[in-house]
Image (tube, rainbow, N blue to C red):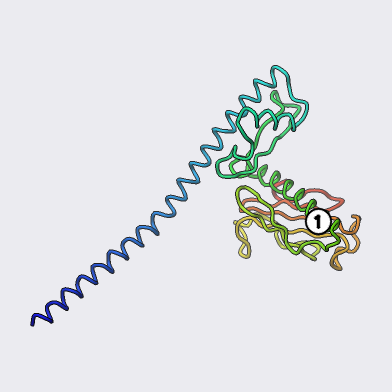
């Protein structure tokens, strides 16, 4: 009887231990999304605050001396904010926008936290296209074919831009409304590579098509036509 009683108590202890472990795991699973959410909100608040401070510093400088170009704006912001790359705590790409018609013709926009999501898509897409062009040119200078994929840093993550031989991809809007895609995706094509890109009007070996889509909008560039997509509508 004593042995049976001991086994029973051990069994109960083991069950309690298992239940505690399950409770801890469930608590972690519930907590992780909350932690990620609050961290994201904290990064957004920090980004908005940093860009607001930088913008006020820009305005003071502009009233006294003005800025000749975007490089002067970046140099000034880098000086007064003790750096440029960490302006956004979340790693968002920060862009300098020039609008001569505005009272303050220079402004800063974060590609991750900007309020105008269409503008964010356009800015991110344009920047990504520039990175792709540089990568394709480097490959050509090294005597190599265009890469099957090009990895570029964008808004704190790595964006994989895939080479396509299709005349157009099936990505025409934000990935948040599409079944086959998730997050941010991008594709590019090179003149002379693939049957559908043999005659494009672009020099052989240069980028002739680029498609970029985030969860909200899509921006596509085609040689001879420029930018289209619902980010431009």
Q: Position of residue 201 (x, y in %)?
A: 91, 55
Residue at the top extreme, as displayed = 64
Q: Position of residue 139 (x, y in %)?
A: 81, 58
**Is residue 178 found left or right of 136 in the rendered image?**
left
Badge 1 marks a residue whose secondary structure is: helix
**At x 84% / y 67%, what residue is drawn?**
194
Residue 116, compared with residue 146, is above or below; it is: above
Mark 1 Cα within 10 Å, few/some/many (few <14, many 20+)? many
Which of the 4 quarters of the picture holds residue 151?
bottom right
**Is residue 227 found left or right of 205 in the rendered image?**
left
Q: Position of residue 149 (x, y in %)?
A: 73, 62
Tally of numbered tags: 1
Nearer the observer, 5 or 230? 5
Can residue 189 be seen at all in this image of the molecule?
yes
Q: Position of residue 10 (x, y in %)?
A: 19, 74
Residue 110, compared with residue 196, is above or below; it is: above
Can residue 233 be seen at all in this image of the molecule?
no
**At x 47% / y 46%, what residue is drawn?**
39
**Residue tagged by mark 1?**
136
Quadrant assignment for the N terminus: bottom left
């Amino acid at each position: 009887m004593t042995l049976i009683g001991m086994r029973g108590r051990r069994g109960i202890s083991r069950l309690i231990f298992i239940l505690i472990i399950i409770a801890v795991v469930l608590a972690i699973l519930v907590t992780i999304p909350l932690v990620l959410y609050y961290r994201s909100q904290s990064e957004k608040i920090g980004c908005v605050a940093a860009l607001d401070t930088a913008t006020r510093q820009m305005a003071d400088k502009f009233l006294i001396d003005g800025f000749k170009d975007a490089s002067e704006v970046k140099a000034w912001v880098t000086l007064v904010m003790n750096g440029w790359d960490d302006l956004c705590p979340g790693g968002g790409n920060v862009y300098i926008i020039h609008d001569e018609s505005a009272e303050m013709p220079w402004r800063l926009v974060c590609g991750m936290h900007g309020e105008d999501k269409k503008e964010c898509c356009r800015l991110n897409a344009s920047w990504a296209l520039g990175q792709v062009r540089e990568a394709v040119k480097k490959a050509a200078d090294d005597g190599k074919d265009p890469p099957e994929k090009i990895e570029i840093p964008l808004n704190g993550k790595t964006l994989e831009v895939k080479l396509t031989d299709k005349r157009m991809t099936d990505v025409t809007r934000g990935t948040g409304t599409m079944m086959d895609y998730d997050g941010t995706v991008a594709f590019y094509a090179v003149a002379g590579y693939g049957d559908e890109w043999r005659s494009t009007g672009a020099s052989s070996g240069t980028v002739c098509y680029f498609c970029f889509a985030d969860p909200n909008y899509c921006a596509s560039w085609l040689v001879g036509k420029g930018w289209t997509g619902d980010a431009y509508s």
